[in-house]
Amino acid sequence: MGLPKTEIFNDQQNKIALWAKVFGHPARVAIIQHLFRINSCVCGDLVEEIGLAQPTISQHLKELKILGLIQGTVEGTSVCYCINPEKWNEMKSEIMDFLDQDISALDCC
Amino acid sequence: MGLPKTEIFNDQQNKIALWAKVFGHPARVAIIQHLFRINSCVCGDLVEEIGLAQPTISQHLKELKILGLIQGTVEGTSVCYCINPEKWNEMKSEIMDFLDQDISALDCC
DNA sequence: TTTCTTTATCGTAATATTGCAATATAACAA
DNA sequence: TTGTTATATTGCAATATTACGATAAAGAAA
């Protein structure tokens, strides 16, 4: 035990859970916010910006990269990261579909 | 180690991470979807509906309850769960604020 | 009362996540 | 070549999460 039983859920449910999980840590939220704020790619300053050790940041970047939300471009010695707009919009619309259900008609106890 | 360093992030970042984390498991996504689909409260049938053991469902319900997204009303021997519309909308707008940033202007490498 | 039904809690095993020191890698500079 | 800089990977310790059997709690039914 200890592993989620993904096989008993449908693709949509598993996908939403995967998107949500990657935002389930404030460091990854902060990384995304920083990429939006500077409005371009970022090389190197994330370690100082976020305040975690370099290997830790690298690991969080990897998780965002695996889902395709960010992409890295090698620029000489450093790597520039930026948001992948297509993936971001794909994720956004899937999350919205889940969140944006009509709640006004709820007939509750 | 092993514990997230929440103190180095701001309240908004931590809150988004908390909301996201609760949806980071497909069982909790499925529970919410079921509550929306039947459009009323649900007593008892979640265990058969989801397909996990009763203590496991109870635990997932508790996590949704802690964040206030669902509420339980005791009905005799059973407990009826339903979505809390106010909390749902609060969560939704906070997540939307995070997701709904302008990506068209991104000047990337 | 006793029994049944329903949900919550406890305890525990298995796995996942977080964080970082140490080290590896890769490109540039001298 | 050697050194420097920036990022990735490895390895490991600490904590968190997931899942469920056993059991508790509480109201309903007999």
Image (cartoon, coloured by chain):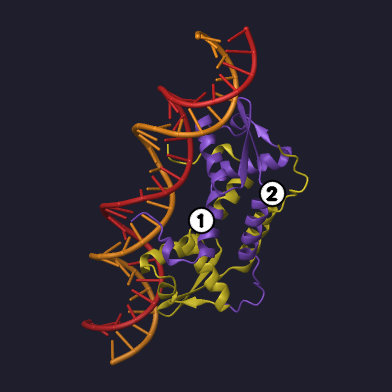
Chain colours: A yellow, B purple, C orange, D red
Front of the two marks 1 and 2: 2
Count neighbours of disc 1 (C-alpha within 10 A) and say few if under 14, some if 14 to 19, many if 20 or more.
many
Considering the image in quadrants, where does the C terminus of chain A appear? top right
User: Toward which corner of the image does residue A67 lie, by quadrant?
Assistant: bottom right
Name the secondary structure under disc 2: helix
Residue plotted at (69% across, 36% down) = B41
- Relative to B39, residue A69 above or below: below
User: Toward which corner of the image does residue B31 lie, by quadrant?
Assistant: top right
Residue A56 seen: yes
- Amino acid found under the numbered disc labelled 1: Gly
User: Toward which corner of the image does residue B43 lie, by quadrant?
Assistant: top right
Apparent side of residue A38 relative to residue C11 in the rendered image (left or right): right
> What is the x, y in percent for residue B34?
67, 39
Return the residue nearer the eye: A73 or A36. A36
Have a look at marks 1 and 2 and say if they share a chain. no
> What is the x, y in percent for residue C3?
53, 10
| Numbered label tally | 2
Residue assigned mark 2: B85
- Amino acid found under the numbered disc labelled 2: Pro
Count neighbours of disc 2 (C-alpha within 10 A) and say few if under 14, some if 14 to 19, many if 20 or more.
some
Residue assigned mark 1: A24
Return the residue nearer the eye: A40 or A98. A98
Residue plotted at (54% across, 49% down) = B22
Return the residue nearer the eye: B74 or A64. B74
Residue plotted at (60% across, 25% down) = B77
- Chain ID for label 2? B
